[in-house]
Image: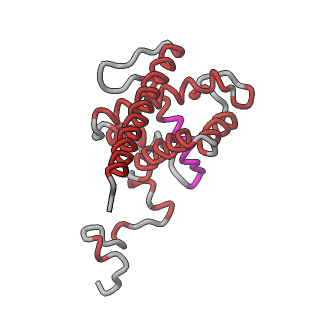
Amino acid sequence: MATPFDKWIRIARSGADAMAQKAQSVGLATAGSMARRLLGQPRPDSGWADWEHGVTHRLLEVLCDYDDALPDPEAVHAVEATRNFVDTLPPRRRSQLHDLLAVIEAGPLVLAPDGQRLAFTSLPDSAAHTYIRGWSESSIPQRRAVFHALKSVCMMGYWSQEQTWSPIGFDPGDHHLDDPRNIGDDDE
């Protein structure tokens, strides 16, 4: 049975968790604002700024790691699919993603991966891969979480495009997408 002290501890922990989440959100908004100032790019009133399109495209290039067998993200309109998906997110999540794009774009100006102080979209391929790998392998859990969030959004934008399916042998007709309970059911 919980004592009054246990209840107080539980309430204090939930309050601390909420404060930590708020602090991370404020920290991201601050970092995004600072990154946009460093880039000389104001936050768009609504929608997507042109430079955000470029960052999304570059992220897709680096994260998809496509080759000659797979189509270029631009050719399959993966940037637009990614943007359309992001636009369905709640306003706070959309805002956070726009802040992340600013931080990703400005980060190499400060961190200089491979000694290159350029915006992310201007980095050579090897430096861009080094920079993104730094996010994925970071000892800081929040940086790894940012990497996974951006990768998930970008992968959804790329792999949701039908042109990417045949090179990997995916045939939606082979899957019972209408009822997930039928997956693996070979009787039909």
Q: What stretch is highlighted in magenta?
A: 57-69
- Residue nearest the viewer, comparing 153 with 7: 7
Residue at 60% of width from left, 50% of height from top?
67
**Total numbered labels placed on residues in the image:** 0
Q: Which residue lies furthest to the right in this view?
A: 115
Q: In which quarter of the image is residue 136?
A: top right
Main secondary structure found in the magenta portion: helix
Percent x, y of residue 18: 36, 38
**Which corner quadrant holds the N terminus?**
bottom left
Residue at 46% of width from left, 39% of height from top?
74
In screen coordinates, is 123 left or right of 51?
right
In screen coordinates, is 120 left or right of 9?
right
Percent x, y of residue 147: 53, 42
- Residue nearest the viewer, comparing 181 with 17: 17
Residue at 40% of width from left, 37% of height from top?
21
**Which corner quadrant holds the C terminus?**
bottom left
Residue 29, placed above or below residue 128: above
Q: Does the magenta stretch include residue 100?
A: no
Percent x, y of residue 51: 46, 23
Q: In which quarter of the image is residue 166?
A: bottom left
Q: Which residue lies furthest to the bottom in this view?
A: 187
In screen coordinates, is 47 left or right of 136?
left
- Residue nearest the viewer, comparing 179 with 146: 146
Residue 163, placed above or below residue 134: below
Here the colouring is secondary structure
Residue at 68% of width from left, 34% of height from top?
127
Q: Does the magenta stretch include residue 65?
A: yes
Percent x, y of residue 99: 43, 27
